[in-house]
Amino acid sequence: MSERKRVLFVAFVLAIGLTMAAVPGAMAQSSVTVTADRGSVELGTETETHSVTVENRGNDSVSIDISSPSGIDVDPDQRSVPGQSSRTIDLDISGDDDASGGTVTVSAGGGSDSFQVDRLPIPGLEDEPLDTGDVLVGGSASGEVDIEELTGEGGLSYASATVVSTDPDADLGVSTSGGTLNWNVYADSGVDQHEDLEWEVELRANGDSRTTRTVDVEGRVIYPAEFGEVTLDDEMTFDEPRGSSSTITKTVDLDVENTGDLELDLDGVTAYASNGGLDVSVADSPDTIDGQSTETVELAVTADTTLSEGTYDVTGSASAADYSVSDASYEGTVDIEHGTELDVPSRIDLGDVPIGEPERRSTTVGESLGYNNVDNLEVSLEDGPDRWLTVEESPSRLAAGDDRPVVFGMAFEPDAEVGTSYEWTYVVDGDGVEEETVTVTASPVPLDLGPIRSEVSSYDGTVADRTVSMINTMDERSRSGDVSGDDITRVLSYGSAASLYLESMEAARERQAAGEYESAQREIVQAAAAYNTMTLYANELEGDAFEDDSSAVISTAESDLDAAIAEQEAYYEERLESENVSLIEEATVQRQLARVALLQGDDERAATLESDAESAFQSYTESVSEGERARQRADETWAAMETEQFVTIAGQPLFLNPAEYDAYAERVDEMDTAYENATATFEEAGETSRAEAVTAEYEQRTAALQVTRWSLFGAVAVYAALVIGIVFRTARGMYWYLRDARESVSGDFLV
């Protein structure tokens, strides 16, 4: 036998052996028989039972496997069958309501059998659970819904419905008509708002109890429209200037709530203020308010600007178009606050500022509304360079409605970049007020010394020439950048002082030449002050050129000033030595001499002269007082004569009582003496105008006294004539009396 045939023979033998080894297992599997009960299973909503018999003739236990349609659940009462046994297995069959029927196959080992599951029609609703929606308390709601066959296999001829579980707060009624479920709900009165309602309804298809199915029905109790809280708790701020109007009108919010579930038709809102300075009206109101929501009614509040801060009461009511809805009244408040506002310019442009030349710019900061003061006012730098610009003056407090100046000082130094616009932002803030900002801008430009050079150049002499030289030196250094900001400021100040000195000295010389030494004195004092300023800045200037020029200027200016002062001194000494100088003139001259001594630097002599001037003024004051007292005595004497001795007719005093002549003459002498003393004293004191006024008054009253003397002479003549007449009348009466007496004695009267 060849090698190839031998290999094939071995392979064949092995294959036969392996096949024979597998035969016993195959024979064991084929020894199981599965037999299902005959007939199909009609499955409704309840569980059905179907049996299968499994005969296991083998030695090993076999497992039960079940295959069923989707949604169909088959549960055997046992899962295996032991070897050498036969078992009847009960299958519990149930299905989902919407599951379709189909074939169920039971397998065990190598055997299997099948049976059919047929679905009965299962009734259901289009939407489950059935929601009846909102039901008004004490009211009813109804509706309908389609009844459907859930399995999809049809067969639903009709359905019935029965309420099997009730709700204690509402009644549910159901009925069917064809494929429609009709329902009606009635909610009891007094049920809580939004109470959930629940029922269970049993549906049955074609009258078959096996198709009975329970459906949940839900609902909710709602309430009609009803006013809830009506609240007013708002504020209005007086944010307009107090003087611009006598009233301020603002809108405040009145919140109106609808606690019901139905829409509320708002009919009207009223509003009243108890304070006479407050008027409230409805500005805008919504037409409706949705259920379970709040809408805002805008109230227009017009307040007198005289009202103080505080809480003010507002009352009113809200009503609905539906008269079944009760009106709602409210009591609210409006808080009035007095606003505070800063009035600050937003921008200040200093423009071009020459380097080294200080610039000041003033602006105003105010409180614009006029109700509250602003305390602890501060002006602070927020952004920008921390040099060159400073706040020189600023208020710490603003009165309501008032404004105060804020002064910015600007001084660029040589290191500032020419042509660059620098910007500073300052914050203005205070207690109880919103802060404001002001932006200050400035651009450095080269210093222009032309104006001060032109001023000084207009004068002649060493002072003017050497000062111009100093200015030219500074101009050259400034353009080359070889100078500090302080030196620029010193030279500018020096030049300004020199210009003032030259102007004052020129005017002083002109006044002295014209003999107007009083006017010259003022100019010399001003020149001396300018000279002192020049000396101060000259000592601070650095550099040989500056020192040479300033030394020459100071020396010449000092010499010129001393000469002018000496001439003033000579003039005032001469006046003081004159014999007809008055007290006031003496005091004035002494004081002017004291000022001259101060200008000369002789403080001791100045103090002595000032003391003499004070003494002279004291004497002058006493003389004026004495003259005034004398004039007062004269006036009192005249008033006494007018009251006690004169009779005034048509404004003219008359003296008609000769018996008062002695007192009259005595008072006239007193008045004359008083007027003469007053006039002399005023003239001595130098009160010429006062002396003239007293003299005029004296002359007027002297003329009036002359009239009174003539009136006295006339009165005496009248009195004498009356006496003579009385004597003559008396004598004549005596004559006739004696004559009648003699005739009666002699009897001659009978003849």
Image (cartoon, helix red, strand yellow):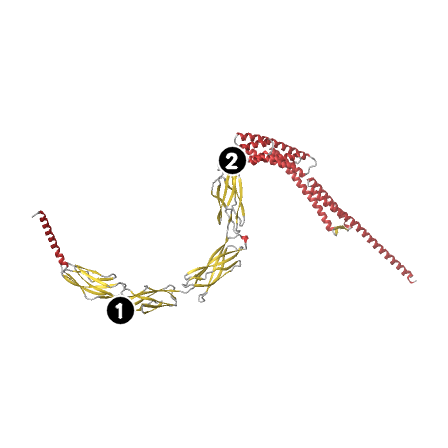
Amino acid identity at mark 1: Ser
Could you tell me which quadrant the C terminus lies in?
bottom right
| Residue holding disc 2 | 486
First along the sequence among labels 2 and 1: 1
| Residue holding disc 1 | 209
The image quarter in which residue 509 lies: top right
Q: In the figure, 642 relative to 329: above or below? A: above
* Residue under the point 50% across and 33% down: 480
Q: In the figure, 27 relative to 427: above or below? A: below
Q: In the figure, 388 relative to 311: above or below? A: above
Left or right: residue 228 compared with residue 707: left
Examine the rendering and report whether any part of residue 721 can be seen: yes
The image quarter in which residue 566 lies: top right
Left or right: residue 652 compared with residue 43: right
Q: Position of residue 295 (x, y in %)?
A: 44, 60
Who is closer to the viewer here, 485 or 334?
Answer: 485
Q: CA distance from mark 2 to mark 1?
A: 116 Å
Who is closer to the viewer here, 133 or 494?
Answer: 133
Q: Position of residue 355 (x, y in %)?
A: 51, 37
